[in-house]
Amino acid sequence: MKMKNKWLKRVLTTMVAIGMVLMTQTSNVSAEISADSKVQVTITGVENGTELSMYKIIDIQIENGAPKAPVYTWVTGVQNWVKDNYPSYIGENHEVTTEFKNLLEDVEKAKSFYEKMAAEIHRSPSTIAITAAKTATASAPSVTLTDIGLGYYLICAKHGVEQVYTPTGFNIAPVEEEGTWSVNDQTVTMKSSTPTIVKTVIDPTDTTVAITDSVCYQLTAQIPTYPEDASAITFAIGDKLSEGLTLKPDTIAVKEASGKEIAATNYDVKKDPGKTAKLTDYTFEIVFKEAYIKANPMLNVQVTYDAEVNDKALTMDALKNIAYIGYNHDPYDTQSYKEKTTEKLVYTYGIKVLKVGESGTDILKNAEFTLSKDGTSLKFKKATDGSYVINPKGDTVLTVGTDGHFTIQGIDEGSYVLKETKVPDGGYVLPNGDITIALKDKNGNGSLEQDEVTLTTKGTYELEGTVELETNKVVMKVKNSKAKDMQLPITGGAGTVLFSIVGIVFMLGGVLVIVRNSKRHA
């Protein structure tokens, strides 16, 4: 009896060693074992649509309701591969050796073994002649498989939505309690990594710009973790700029998140527009080399570049550019390339001036204005649609067209001073003072609200009606008034002025006479 108990303890110890399972737990459901014992396995940590394959790589020998020696043996289809690649893991009778049991206690070594075996299973032709014991497609964050026999299994996943999975091993082994052997249902969590990309504007510090401004973008992305012997390894970072932005190719820089430059030998840069493997348009693309990807799993890398806001921005409410990372989400399938995108919006703003007469409805033309910021008159050129856009080589004059208005596009937030410099024809008076226009997009969404626009008139400037807003544009009506008929004709006026002067002279003469007479009497 003592001998039997010792044997049971040795077997149980073996079970504990080899039963080390990556992120597994057992349920409370159990049953007495036999060679045909089946359990339920729930696999978590998977995305909808992920295809799972379970490969049995080790058998468990059962006899008369208990394990029998050798308890663990490699299945027929993997025996030759284990002998050729890991001879110390297999005994003369194909049994699992103590060295392999010890391996399972070292997570990193076990991970390397799983990855190499998975790579060989997926290789064609393969030296591992096994088929999946179970396959399933996840339709929820987990999937449950039934009728799973005793043994040690390798789970491989593919066709995930975003995650890159690494092969995971787990054991369905009997446990002993008070002399009775039973087997429990299992829960296994798949190991995976999810490549990420974040896009920010680092200069300017906000998301509002003007035409000719330079915008500095930063892309931060994480390199996926690929199995050691993966046959499909891709990692690329790219960006597609809108027509309102012009790439400055020489500004592209690639660094680690720490700020350390990544040697140019570790990646290729495509600076000319092209298409990705998914035939998606890009402005530029950086493709990292396989050796660098494998050597730097989970490393955050940063790509910075500058783009200039051009005059095509005036037709857009928002300047959108879409950054992406491209990678193989199935490390053993070269056709599994996918792209994950993110976008960043920057905004420009505009001013539209309608020139009207005293009635507020009659349209005036040919008036001229200037717009200044921080005391400097801005220069403009006309775009193809007739709008004025900022251009350092342009002119400061803004001319009201025959339709009675002019439009300025592509300016930033801030405070601007509008001033009329030439009145329309027809006897109109040039107002004195100016109009201050203050724009502040508090929500940073490119859409101006009433409380985000402040107009201040000085002097004789008048606005007709209320100020209107067209998404990112201020629309105002500026009135002109004609000279009032309150003066006499020129000759009459001159005569009046002369008469007044003569009268004053006589008054002064009378004063002098009075003063002199007073002195005499004194």
Image (cartoon, helix red, strand yellow):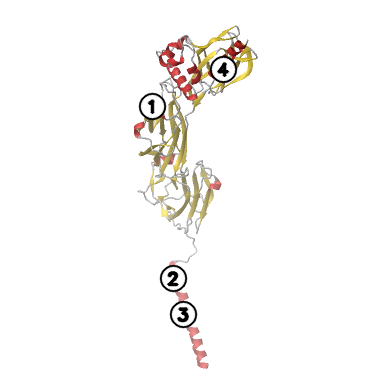
Q: Which residue does the numbered mark 2 point to in the structure image?
A: 494
Residue type, numbered disc 3: Val
Residue at point 49%, 89% (across, down):
516
Q: Which mark is residue 91?
A: none
Of labels 2 and 4, earlier in sequence is: 4
Instruction: Label 1: state its secondary structure.
Output: helix
For the residues carrying marks 2 and 3, which lies nearer the camera in this image? 3
User: Which quarter of the figure has residue 181?
Assistant: top right
Contact (Cβ within 8 Å) of mark 3 with mark 1:
no
Residue type, numbered disc 4: Thr
Q: Which residue does the numbered mark 4 point to in the structure image?
A: 13
For the residues carrying marks 1 and 4, which lies nearer the camera in this image? 4
Q: Which mark is residue 505?
A: 3
Q: Which residue does the numbered mark 1 point to in the structure image?
A: 290
Marks 2 and 3, how far apart in space? 17 Å
Indicate the position of residue 329 as horizontal and vertical percent values.
46, 24
